[in-house]
Image: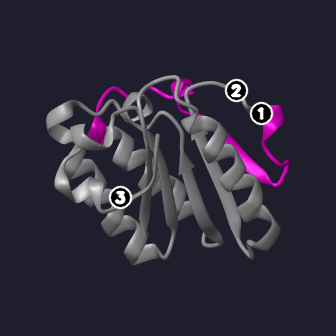
Amino acid sequence: MVQIIAGEKGKGKTKHLLEKVNTAVQTANGNIVYLDKSQKHMYELNNKVRLINVTDFPITNCDEFMGFICGIVSQDNDLEELYLDSFLTIANVKDDEISRAIEKLDIISEKYNVKVVLSVSKNEDELPECAKAKIIISL
């Protein structure tokens, strides 16, 4: 299942994402991974959450990012939840690729039973229809 926290830059999406991940740790049976564009939120995350700074890796487009996600999923059979902060930035997703990227994440999520939560710096009305149905918080 893919869930989306949507809103313009600076509206507080990361705060909601951090609250969600730290709450999930309390009931999770498996592992939780948080992907971000920096180490900035390291001390705000529960120490049971694995933080990955995506900019440490040479990812230049959306397809490479999807391969990166598949690598994370394939190496951790106990992966339960995946949180992606600043999704459009870390995944290098262009506006015309949003639908395809979310569809791919949905396929990965369903096949490997991994919950995926994204923060997306766009208003709800700027997102494609396939993404609107997945919005859990719109700021």
Residue where numbered disc 1 is placed: 42
Q: Amino acid at mark 1?
A: Met
Q: CA distance from mark 1 to mark 2?
A: 5 Å
Q: How is the image coloured?
A: one colour
Rendered residue at 60%/36% (across/down):
14
Circle number at residue 75: none
Specify the quadrant of the image occupied by residue 123: top left
Give the image location of residue 32, x and y in percent: 67, 59
Q: Is residue 48 magenta?
A: yes
Specify the quadrant of the image occupied by residue 68: top left
Residue where numbered disc 2 is placed: 39
Q: CA distance from mark 1 to mark 3?
A: 24 Å
Q: CA distance from mark 2 to mark 3?
A: 23 Å
Please rate how many residues cluster around mark 3, counting C-alpha atoms within 10 Å: few if below 14, some from 14 to 19, many from 20.
many
In-front residue for pair 7/46: 7
Q: Which residues are magenta?
A: 42-63
Rendered residue at 29%/38% (across/down):
62
Q: Compared with residue 29, is residue 115 higher up or lower down, i.e. above or below? A: above
Element class at badge 1? helix
